[in-house]
Image: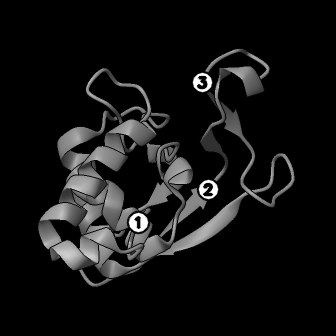
Amino acid sequence: MMAFFATLYYAGLRPEEASELRRQNLVLPDEAGKWGQMQLTHSQVRSGSRWTDSGDVREQAPLKHRAVGDTRQVPIHPELAAILRTHVQSYVMAAPNSRVFSSLAGGPVTDRMYLKVFHDARTAAFTPEEAASPLMEVP
C-alpha cells in the first residue's frame, strides 16, 4: 500500500485512477534521479450496484472531466519512480496489462482496503485532537 499512497501523493492521482493503473501505462527510468511518465486511460469508480449498468459495485469509467478515450499524461517524480520501480519488481506480473496495485486475490485495490490502511495510519500519526479534526480525513 505504500507505493499506492506514494502515487496519490507524488502524482496527484485519485484513488480510483491509481487502482486501474497498469504496467503498460508506466515509463520508469532505469537510473535513479530521472523522471518517468504515466499515461492514465481510465478509472475504476465505486458507484454501487444500483448505479452501474452491469449491476457490479465498481465499473470502469473514463477519466473524470475527460471524454471517453481521452488520456492524461502525468510526470513521475524521481522519488516516485524509485518507489514504483521497486514495487513493480517485487509485486507486479510481467504482463503489460497487469495491475500495478492489486488485492491479494489479484483484483483491484478497493476503497475498503485503502481506507482502512489510511485511517489506521492517520490515527497512529495524529494526536487525539488532530484525529478528531477534518485534517486529512480522506486520501
Q: Residue at x 66, y 35 (%)?
A: 47
Q: Is residue 36 above or below residue 109?
A: below
Residue 10 numbered mark, or none:
none
Q: Residue at x 55, y 48 (%)?
A: 16
Q: Residue furthest bottom?
A: 33
132 vs 139, left or right, is left
Q: Label 1 sits on what residue type?
A: Glu
Residue 81: quadrant of the picture: bottom left
Q: Label 2 sits on what residue type?
A: Leu
Q: Secondary structure at mark 3?
A: loop
Q: Which residue is mark 3?
A: 57
Q: Which residue is mark 1?
A: 137
Foreground residue, 14 or 117? 117
Q: Position of residue 24 (x, y in %)?
A: 50, 46
Which is more N-terminal, label 2 or label 3? 2
Answer whether residue 1 is visible to the viewer in this image: no
Colour scheme in use: one colour
Q: Disc 3 to disc 2, how far (Cα)? A: 22 Å
Label 3 or label 2, whichever lies nearer to me, is 3
Q: Secondary structure at mark 1?
A: loop
Which is more N-terminal, label 2 or label 1? 2
Circle 2 residues within 10 Å: few <14, some 14–19, many ≥20? many
Q: Which residue is mark 2?
A: 40
> Are the residues flagged by discs 3 and 1 in contact, CB closer than 8 Å?
no
Which is more N-terminal, label 1 or label 3? 3
Q: Position of residue 137 (x, y in %)?
A: 40, 66
Q: Residue at x 80, y 61 (%)?
A: 65
Q: Is residue 53 above or below residue 100?
A: above
